[in-house]
Image (spheres, helix red, strand yellow):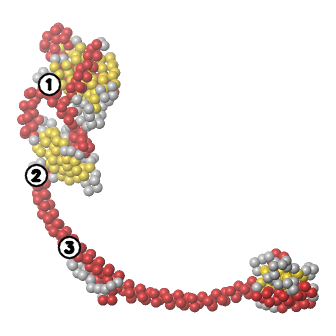
Amino acid sequence: MGLLATISETAAIACYLQQEEMMKEVVKGISKNKFVAGVILIDSQGDIVESGQKIENSDQNGPYSIRYPLLSPFQSRNSKSISENIGMLILLQNKEVIEQTARSLAIKGIIPLIFITFLTAFITSALIYFLFTRPISEIARILHNVKPGHAYLLQCPSMHQNNEIGSLLSDINALLKRNAQALNDERSLRDRLSFLEKQYRTIFEKANSGIFLADQNGKIIVYNPFFLKMACGTGIKVQVLHNFIELFVDSSKVDLMVKKTITHQQATSSDLLVKGENTTSKQTWVHAVFINCTDDLGEPMIECMLYDITQRHLEEKKNKDIAKKDHLTGLLNRRGGEIQMEYILSVCQPEHNIAFFLLDLDGFKEINDTYGHNGGDKILVEVSRRLQSINRATDTIIRWGGDEFVLILYGDINKETCFGIGEKILRSLNSPIDLGDGISDTVGVSIGISSMSAQTARKDILLLSADKAMYMVKDKGKNGIYYSDMDRKIYESRFL
């Protein structure tokens, strides 16, 4: 723009006078400048004078072209009046020269800058090394040689007493002191634990009771020699160690006890028969105590202690059997049945159901009157045998009195379960019964069923409801089933 300002007045005069020679001199002088590739001067009449590189129409408005309007030489550019435009000066800048000049200036300017940058980096690195890196490396070297538990303190150079290095050394010394104290405390605690561990191992290994720890799935984690001997005696040691419930004959009862222990987080206990020899003289009975605990991750665990009570159990069983068993059928009598009812109510899980079946034989009085008490006794014995063959190992059968029987079911049972067992009983008891001397006869049975959840179940309510249900069958023609669910108020009857 400085070049244009210089020659604009001369170019304006040439255009104003419309002197072609003068216009040529102007453009020729401008084109001699190395930064100018071409020049066009246009006067007010449209006459064109060019010099240097020919400027195409497309280049006149390009990034390297400059258009400079020429005003009358007799009017100031700063004048606020309307200017008279007497021509146009168009310059095409020399792109190559401009770019080459720019590169040259850039190179001349960047070399000092690079030198200053490297010098600054070198000085900064040297300061960091001498003020920070070397002292910290020395601290690291000393720490590497410090033995755990030794109260060795690092010395701080005087030049670093009041700076960050000094603070770091002070904190490291405090940490070394605490570490030495912690290690000494840990060593004392380890010695104490070692002493207690020896005592515990002696108790654990020499105990005359089985002790083991199992996860919530029954897999045994650790056990003592007495328990291992007990597991080996079952003949299924591998299965027992995989699931300790397999150790016991009544595995369903143990399963309920374990679930109750985990769910309610309280200890449960019971006398249990261990699998092994089937003869009574070689049975092993234990008093099992299950205690809820957790592992390091908070997962439920079962701790168990098994006390051998075989001799005591045999003596107690002998005495109890006399009082609890019906002498004719071998089933539980009314007294023994009531004890069993209370036991079942105490161990049954809250989410399970309990069902009482009250069975009354149809036509028994007629048979008893016809064939005498001997014939009646044969009917009762055979009915008892058939009931035992139908029902599951966990079900309880009671001779309630006379020709009445009670069945107790508990666990995961529902209406269809009850009807299924009831219908089996009906079909079984409707078959003829041999009374001897080539005589046979049949009896029917009226079955009243009462069901409640274990959480709300009561013995008196279940018995009363079953009794009412049984009489509903009697009133409707006998030899059938009446089911009542006391919780859900479901009532249904079925007859053969």
Given the current orientation, which residue lies at the most extreme top position? Answer: 370
- Residue 202 lies, in percent from the top left, at 11, 57
Image mark for residue 181: 3
Q: Given the image, on which type of amino acid does mark 3 rest?
A: Gln
Q: Secondary structure at mark 1?
A: loop
Which residue is depicted at the point 78% across and 80% down?
65
**Quarter occupied by the C terminus:** top left
Q: Given the image, on which type of amino acid does mark 2 rest?
A: Ala
Upstream in sequence: badge 1 or badge 2: 2
Is residue 200 in view from this perspective? yes
Which residue is depicted at the point 15% across and 52% down?
224
**Residue with the mark numbered 2:** 207
51 and 323: which is toward the camera: 51
**Residue with the mark numbered 1:** 333
Q: CA distance from mark 1 to mark 3?
A: 71 Å
| Mark 3 residue crowding within 10 angstroms, few (<14) / some (14–19) / many (20+) | some
